[in-house]
């Protein structure tokens, strides 16, 4: 491969990586502002599986 081709490919990868990071940050920021990302303190203490999904973290053992 020529140096020009390598430069072109590396530039393309760099630009696409930057665009992906910016898009991810925008999506994360939008979701955080609109819906909220974190649980409240009570839900954090209780655990997300129980607070949100109403299931235990570990299955019941059969005895």
Image: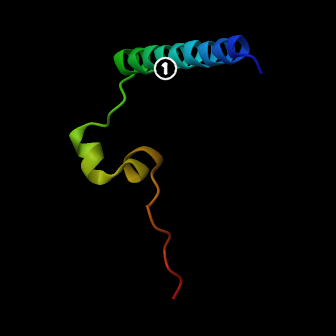
The answer to which image quadrant residue 36 occupies is top left
Residue 12 position within the rendered picture, expressed as x and y whole percent measured from the top left:
64, 13
User: Badge 1, how many Cα within 10 Å: few under 14, some, many 20+?
Assistant: few
Q: Where is residue 15 in the image (x, y as percent from the top left)?
A: 57, 12
Task: Answer left or right for 12 relative to 23.
Answer: right
Q: Residue at x 68, y 18 (%)?
A: 6
Does residue 23 appear left or right of residue 50 in this picture? right
At horizontal 68% and vertical 17% (from top left) the residue drawn is 9
Of residues 32 and 47, which is closer to you in this image?
32
Q: Residue furthest left?
A: 41
Which residue does the image show at 34% across and 52% down from the upper left? 47
Residue placed farthest to the front in the image? 2
Task: Check the image and name the residue furthest to the bottom.
Answer: 63
Residue at image point 26% right, 36% down: 40
In the rendering, at what x and y percent does residue 50 appear?
40, 53
Residue 53 in the image, given as x and y percentages of width and height: 47, 47
- Closer to the camera in the image, 33 or 4: 4
Identify the element where label 1 is drawn: helix
Colouring: rainbow
**Which quadrant does the N terminus fall into?**
top right
Q: Name the residue under label 1.
A: 21
Residue nearest the observer in this picture, 63 or 36? 36
Question: 17 or 50: nearer the eye?
Answer: 17
Badge count? 1
């Amino acid at each position: 491969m020529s140096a020009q081709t390598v430069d072109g490919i590396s530039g393309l990868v760099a630009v696409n990586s930057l665009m992906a990071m910016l898009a991810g940050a925008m999506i994360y920021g939008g979701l955080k502002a609109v819906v909220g990302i974190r649980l409240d303190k009570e839900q954090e203490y209780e655990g997300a599986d129980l607070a949100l999904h109403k299931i235990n973290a570990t299955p019941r053992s059969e005895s």
